[in-house]
Image (tube, rainbow, N blue to C red):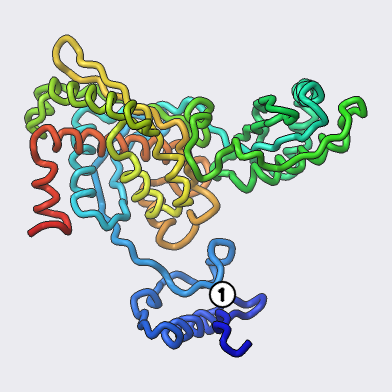
Amino acid sequence: MSDLPKPIPKISGNNFQAEIIKARQAFVTDETGSDIPHLSAMTIDPSTLKGNVENPLGAAQVPIGLAGPMIVDGEFAKGPYYVPMATTEGTLVASYSRGMRILTQLGGAKTTIIERYMQRAPVFHCEDARKARAMGEWIRAQFEQIKAAAETTTSVGKLHHIEGYGVSRMWYTRFNFTTGDAAGQNMAGKAADAACKWIMANRPAELGHVTYTLSGAIDTDKKHSQINTLHSRGARVVVEAVLPRNLMLSMTRADTRDLYRARQVSMLGGMLCGTSNNGLHAANGIASLFIATGQDEANVAESQAGLTYVELRDNDDLYWSLTLPSLIVATYGGGTGLATQRECLEMLGCYGSGKVEEFAEIVAATVLAGEISLAAAAIAGEWVESHDKHGRNRP
C-alpha cells in the first residue's frame, strides 16, 4: 500500500558503516522534520557497535559528573576512587560526593560480597504432581552430568547449584551459574538450554512424557522479586559503616540520634507500602553508574532492591548497613567495551577480567554514600533548599 510508512534505511550485512548511519540521520530529519545535530555528533567508532545496538543513529549525551574522593574498605576495592556518575538530576553528584567524603574520613565503607550468581529458570512439564516430584529428585541426583552438559557452552560459566520447586504438575528450577566478569544472562541462558537438552535426552522412561520451557519466569529477569532478595541474583553485597556523632554534626549538621529515629520511621513506612528497598534512593547511584560504565540499564530494576539496618550505639555513634541482594554488574562484555563506558571503567581501574568484584564493591559503597548524605540533608533541613539552589527547580 502506498500510504504505509517508509522503512528505516538498512544495508544487510553492512548496517554499521558511517554511510548508512548518515542515511538514517537524514531519514529522521526528512520523515519527522527534526534536526538532530547533537544526536548525530558521536565520537564512537560505528564498527564497534555491532552486538550492542541495531540500526545505529547516533549517541545520547548524558552529562557525567565526578564524585569523590571515596575510599572503600573492601576485600577487592580500596581506592581512593573518583566516581563517574551519569545523571541529569541536579544536586545528585554533590550529595554523593559529600557522602563519599564522610566515608573517606572513616577510612572507607566496609564491603563484603556474600555470593554472586546468575540464573536461568527452566520449568519441566510432567504428567502429574508425583511425576514432577520424581523429575526433581532425578535432576538432583544427576547434578554432575547436568553441570557437565551446561558447561560445554562456556569457558567461563560454571553451574553452581540448582534450586527446585514443585507446583501443580510442573517442576520449576533455578540454575545458578557463576559467570566470571560478565553479568552473564545470555551465558546462563545458553548453558541452561544445553543442560535441558541433555535432561530430555537422558531422562528415564518411568518419568513419562516431559516437555520444558527454558524460562519459567522465576529467574525474574529485569524485574525485582522476593526470591532474588532471598537467593541472590547477581552479587549479594553488604556495605557498612559506623558514623561518629561528632563527625556527622560537623560535616552535615545532622545528629545521629535524629538519623536513627528517622530510619525507624522509614522502616515502618517501607513496611506499610511494601517497598523492595527500605532505604532512600539506591536507584539514583546505581543508575548513574550503570549508564556511565556500560551496564545493562534495565538491571537497575533488580539491582536497586536493598535492606537497610541501623543501630544506635551507647556512645551515640550510628552503625549503618545496606545489603544489596541482586546487584548485577560486569566489567567485561555487553556495553562495557564501548568507548565512553570503557573510559569510565578504566577511570575506576575496573575494566576487563578480574575486576568485577572490585566494581561491585565500589557501586555498593557509592550507594551507601548517597543514602547517608540524603538522610543527613533531610534531618538538617537542607533537602529542599539544596534542590532549589542547585537543581532545575531553582527559582
Q: Which residue is drawn at 66% across and 75% down?
A: 13
Residue lying at the far top in this picture: please name it. 314
**Rendered location of residue 70, percent (x, y):** 26, 39
How many circles with numbers are drawn on the protein?
A: 1
Viewer-proximal residue among 386 and 179: 386
Name the element at disc 1.
loop
Residue lying at the far bottom in this picture: please name it. 2
Residue 161 to residue 181: above or below: above
Circle 1 sits on which residue? 16
User: In the shown orientation, is residue 225 left or right of residue 167?
Assistant: left
- Mark 1 neighbour class, 10 Å CA radius: few under 14, some 14 to 19, many 20 or more: many
Q: Which residue is drawn at 25% across and 20% down?
A: 319
Residue 260 is drawn in which quadrant?
Answer: top left
Residue 29 is drawn in which quadrant?
Answer: bottom left
**Rendered location of residue 219, percent (x, y):** 59, 37
Quarter placement of the C terminus:
bottom left
Residue 21 to residue 339: above or below: below
* Amino acid type, callout 1: Phe
**Rendered location of residue 166, percent (x, y):** 69, 25
**Rendered location of residue 150, percent (x, y):** 74, 38
User: In the shown orientation, is residue 80 left or right of residue 57?
Assistant: left
Q: Residue at x 41, y 26 (%)?
A: 112
Residue 345 to residue 103: above or below: below
Residue lying at the far right in this picture: please name it. 205
Residue 373 is drawn in which quadrant?
Answer: top left
Quarter placement of the N terminus:
bottom right
Viewer-proximal residue among 70 and 38: 38
